[in-house]
Amino acid sequence: MPDETFRKNVPEIDPTEIEDSRTAIADEHHSFLEKVMVKSGFGDLYDARDFTEVVFRVMRDLMTREAIERVESELHQEAVPTKEKALQMEVADLWKDTNPIVGFLSRIRQPLRGPAPIGIDSNLFLTRVANEGALPPTIQAEQGVKAVFAATKDQLSEERIQEIAGWLPDRIRELWEQA
């Protein structure tokens, strides 16, 4: 029965006295995926990882192969310190496309810049991220994108930050600069 108590010797804990470890750690001590998780509002590191991959995919679609490789060369920090195999990776692993066909096509096609339907504008960027990233209703696409952008900018040189800004459409560039 749901109202039945099975373990009567467990002390009751006041939830207001429990410290949330995600807010107790200073931001600069968070790993890449922890930053994305905390700033976006995702419930776990797996959701943050999956969403980051989608944001990175749309970003790469806007860039040349050479620009993609320059960004990747700077993303070699651990995404999150863990013993879980599914999360043991560098940020560069998140940047690379895991789908070999998509990865191949991105190497031979031109950047998808400009207004839709030919290119990716701000609205299409956010729509793709929301749809492909399977955002929960509690998280806005812009909020999640800014979280990924902030964590990414912490990994990059100023030169690379400016280069990426040059590839992004207007409203997305504003999110990049705010992050």
Image (spheres, grey):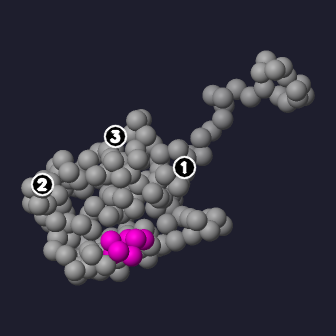
Q: Residue at x 29, y 45 (%)?
A: 142
Q: Is residue 151 visible?
A: no
In the image, which is nearer the foreground, mark 3 or mark 2?
2
Magenta residue span: 97-103
Count of picture labels? 3
Q: Residue at x 33, y 58 (%)?
A: 55
User: Left or right: 166 with respect to 146?
Assistant: left
Vertical arrangement, residue 160 with respect to residue 51, above or below: below
Whether residue 102 is in magenta: the answer is yes
Q: Earlier in the sequence, mark 1 or mark 3?
A: 1
Left or right: 128, with 92 as reference point:
left
Residue where numbered disc 2 is placed: 116
Q: Secondary structure at mark 1?
A: loop
Q: Which residue is mark 1?
A: 44
What quarter of the picture does the N terminus occupy?
top right
User: Which residue ends up furthest to the left in the rendered image?
Assistant: 115
Q: Residues within 10 Å of mark 1 (few under 14, many from 20)?
A: few
Q: Nearer the viewer, residue 60 or 7?
A: 60
Q: Name the N-terminal-most of marks 1 and 2.
A: 1
Q: Earlier in the sequence, mark 3 or mark 2?
A: 2
Q: Quadrant of residue 103?
A: bottom left
The x, y position of residue 19, in whole percent, is: 62, 39
On the image, numbered disc 3 is attached to which residue?
140
Picture layout, residue 156 above or below residue 26: below
Quarter of the rendering containing residue 100: bottom left
**x and y percentages locating residue 145 in the rendered image:** 32, 51
* Residue under the point 40% across and 35% down: 137
Dot 1 amino acid type: Asp
Position in image of residue 169 (x %, y %): 15, 57
